[in-house]
Every structure is written in structure tokens, then in C-alpha cells.
Image (tube, coloured by chain):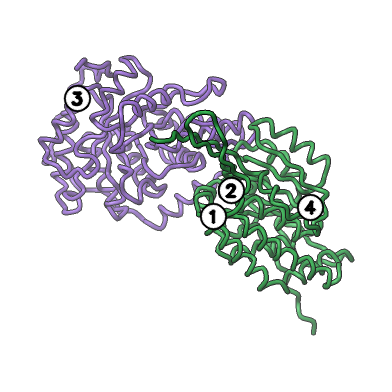
Amino acid sequence: MNRLDVKKTYKLYIGGKFPRSESGRYLAAKSPAGQHLDNFAHASRKDFRDAVVAARVAVEGWGKASAYNRGQILYRAAEMLQNRAGELVNEIARSTGVTSVKAKREVTLAIDRLVHFAGWTDKYQQVFGSVNPVASSHFDFTTPEPTGVAVVLAPDEPALLALVSLVAPVVLSGNTAIVVASEKFPLPAATFAEILATSDLPGGVVNLLTGKRAELVPHIASHMDVNAIVDGAGDRELAAKLQAGVAINLKRYFNRAAADWFSARAEEPYRILDTVEFKTAWHPIGV
Amino acid sequence: MKAPALKKVGATPVPFRDSRLAIRNLGVPTVDAVMVEERAAAFTKRSIKTSTKLAGLKMAVAMCDLTTLEGKDTPGKVAYLCRKALAPADPKYNLPSCAAVCVYPNMVKYARKFLGDHSPVHIASVATGFPSGQYPLRTKLEEVRRVVGDGADEVDMVIDRGAFLAGDHAKMFDEIAATKQASGPAHLKVILETGELVTYDNVRLASEIAMQAGADFIKTSTGKVNPAATIPVTLVMLEAIRDYFFATGIRIGMKPAGGIRTAKQALAYLVMVKETLGDDWLTPDRFRFGASTLVNDVLMQIAKQVDGNYQGPDYFSLP
């Protein structure tokens, strides 16, 4: 007798919890051969709204955590990723149809990249900040500070590596992120969220939505409480819509698509600067 | 201190109230806790959308008692609150002013100075040893006379929970009656502090005593005790108001206060008032929200309804 298969429904990850979509909708994840793998939540605009609220709440604590602490936590996330690498390899292989050797390469690189960016938490201020020579008797410092809540749109492929490469530079400086996962291959991202939930990352720092990008994009563009958008999705039409919307509250928009996610260029620390603000302080000397 | 413009009570004298003459504790029904909570939960599941939602949200703004009850309150903060109560948002949203500002006794004169004598926004002052009520009656009444003299339109008194819980209902009754007399033309809101009354039966009984003793409004909480206003506890009080109306024909107002932070909650309360007491109570004269942060969430939801995009707190005034 054949055993009845248990099909998992991957849920959203909002504020450290795993809710179903408020709309109750879900979609089927299929393998390239058309085989029904599992189900995943189809996020609505209200799920996005809830995620922004959760991210805004989390930015308070995460932005104030010490750089060292944030580094430790991201490193811990990399440890957890390492621990469950096998699961992710399987997830990538069955979703995208690549060989498990290729999938393993992607997962290993994702772990390395997270470790790499974990190291930047207590270094980016020194590297990108400055002490400025001024003509009056002041010390003058310019330091980068997190901008707040950022939306990250991940491309379809490589589903995991691109997502990690996009999210890590956003959150390491103290921002919180709402990630819109790959539309075609959402399962690796959903599994990654489950891994993050068991690392020490506070709830709400990374929030994950799965579903249809085009449905969420107008609301992402017009939301007044989003400070920045890092768009790695590589969809020109959606990029245009996002760019048109950002003027409403002057949120930052960066198109980070079309890179080779396996190359070292995806590791460059300049990505951190997408979601920081520079603050300059004048401190009188001798007071 | 200059006498403020207050609503005249007319020629009818304030009736003499005494606990000895009141029908005490008789016929006060017990509360079915399970059913109250079931019914309360049902109010939160109504789907209110588009124009109905917008109308409900505007009504909620008009019913807000903007409140600041902190040790660090200053005349500046009170002036800010008054300004916000007069014009809660950009004129393009066409919103009513809030019902009142609710402040500590020392702040009443500043609020009156800022609002002037003919303001649409009332001034409510907490009094009678807020928030504990553990003070001698003489100082409580002195406080009440003083805030009314300073220009308060409404007095939010606290009951002596210690006396009530010890079974000395007569003391509670007489204190409310004395406060009613001392507050003169000002409206009297009686705070039961339901979080300290423990059971629904106590809330029901305390509501009954407060109404018989002369309350114009009954109010759930000070906001200093957890739990503050909840939907079930408010429902118990609304039912007490309904039964009191059937028995006497007198319409008593209701003010849930503390813990109401979202527009969604506010709409659930409005639905409950509508379905328990009817349209007569859907006015700022008979229903109020005591809140400090609620109004900003309501304003954000109104802006969302009108402008179409999700809002952020950066674009609204401080709560």
C-alpha cells in the first residue's frame, strides 16, 4: 500500500512568527518537471503591511544592539545554515532541478557569504566613516547609521545565494528587512527563514514573504514607512514601478539585479552603503 | 481664577443622593462570564470596509479624549495636546475635533487658557486622588472643586476600590454622590478601575452603584493598571447602562480607557455600542475613548482610506 504523502505548506515569516497569509491563499510549488512538491503561502498586501509593522518595531532593538552583538548573531545564523545545509541542498535541487553538486556549491557559498558579512558589522563604520579636517576648532566626524526598514526583492535564481547576498549587507548595519522571496523557487527561501528563526536573530529583523511580486510591488512603492528598497529581482517593469513610487516619501531605491551572484563582486562591502545614512557631528574642542 | 463657560444644567436641582435611600445591591444580576467573552469576541470579527470604515474612524476621532497623565506633563505638552485635539489632522481629511483633553488637576488652568472659553474641545480632569483614590474625602472634594473652578468641564473621579472590595459599598456610593455635588455643572465620569475589581460580577455591581450615585459616565480604567479596558469588561458595563436606562429612562455615558491602541479595536468598540445600546449612544456626549496613542493609528487608517497608500508614523504628530 502506498503511503499518502504529507505536503508541507511553507508559511510566511513575520516578526519572528510563522503566520499563514492573512488572505488564506496558498500556491503550489512545482519541480521543473511539473511535479507537485509542496505548497507555500501567497502573501497579500496586508501581510506586507504587517511585515512592515514588525520590521519597524524590531529596528529599535536591532539598530541599538552593539556591532559586536550583531556580528555574533549573524555568525550564529551562518552556523545554523551550515548545520542544515543538507536540507537546503535538497530544497534547491528538487525545486530548480540542478544537480546536488551545484546546489551544494550554492549553499556553501551562501554560508561563506553570511560569515563574510557578519565580520563587517564592526568594521564598516571605520572603513566608511571619516574624521574630517575643518577650519574651526572642532572635531568633525562622519559616521554611517542604519536607515531603518528596507524591502529586499530577491531574484528567482540563485534562490538562496542571491537572497543571502542581498539581505546580509542590509541587516548587518542595524536595518531590518522585508524580503520578497523568489517567485519561481520560494522553497529554499522559506527553509532559510525557518533556519533564521532558530538562530539568535531577533524576531522582525528579517521578514519573509512568498507569493507574487507584481501584486506586492505597488504597495511596496507607496508605503510611507519603508525607508529603502534593494531590488535584486531583475524585472524591468517592476523596477520602473518601484522607482516611480519612491518619490512619495523619498525612500532610497537601488537596483542590484543582473550581477553574477557566485562572483566575489557580490561580496563587496559597498552594498552596505545602500542602506545607511551618513551623519556628521561637530564637536567643539576644549569644552 | 476666571469662571469658564460651562454647560448649564438648567433649573432642575441636583437630586439629593444618599446610600441609605438607594436600592442597594438588589436586583443586580450576575454575569455569565463565558457568554460575555463569546459575545465580546464576536464584535472583533465584523468586517467593516471602505466608506463605512471611514465614517467609523471619523466618529472615533470625535469621541477621543486625548489623554496625558504623566508625572512629567508640562504646560507645553498640554498646549500641544489641545492643539492636536482642535485639529487632529490636515484639513484635507475634513475631520472633527476630538471630544476632550484629559489632564491632571494642575494642568487644567493651562488647558483652559489655551482653549479659551468657547472651545469645541472639552477639558476633562482626573480628580479625587487619581489613580488610587486612597485619600480622605475632604481632600478629594477640595480637589474636585478646584479643578471645576480652574475650568474643567468634566471630572474623571476614581472610586475607592479598597472600600468596594471590602464590601463597604455605602462608602463608595456616598463618595460618588458627594463628588457629584462638588463637581456642580461639570460632568462626572466615574472610573471603576475594572482591572482591580477582579470579577465581572464586581464590575456590574460597581457600575450599578456608580450610576445610582449620580455618575454621568462610567469609565473602565485609569490606564495605570493592567488589564485596562477590554471588550468583555466594557460589554458588562454597557449592559449595566442599558438595564439602568430601561429601569429609569436615564442615559448614562460610557468611556473605555487604557489599552485601546488600534483603529481596528476602536471600530470593534463602536460596533459593540451600536449593538448593545443603539444609535443614541453613538455620540461624543455618551461614548468616549480614553487614549493617548489611539488617535494616531486612527489618523493613519483614515489617511490610508483617503490617499490609498499605507502610512508611517513619521508623517504624523507625536502621540
User: In the image, is residue A126 above or below residue B112?
Assistant: below
Q: CA distance from mark 4 to mark 3?
A: 70 Å
Secondary structure category for the residue under label 4:
loop
| Circle 2: element type | helix
- Residue kind at label 1, given as amino acid type: Ala
According to the image, label 2 marks what residue? A125
Which residue is labeled 3 in the image? Answer: B184
Number of the front mark, 4 or 3: 4
Whether labels 4 and 1 belong to a single chain: the reply is yes
The subunit carrying tag 3 is: B
Quarter of the rendering containing residue B207? top left
The chain under label 1 reads A
| Left-right relation of B123 to B87 | left
**Can you say whether A30 is above or below A255 in the image?**
below
- How busy is the neighbourhood of tag 4: few (under 14 within 10 Å), some, or many (20 plus)? many
CB under 8 Å between discs 2 and 4: no
Residue under numbered circle 4: A155
List the residue tagged with mark 1: A67
Q: Which chain is green?
A: A
The image quadrant where one finds the N terminus of chain A is: bottom right
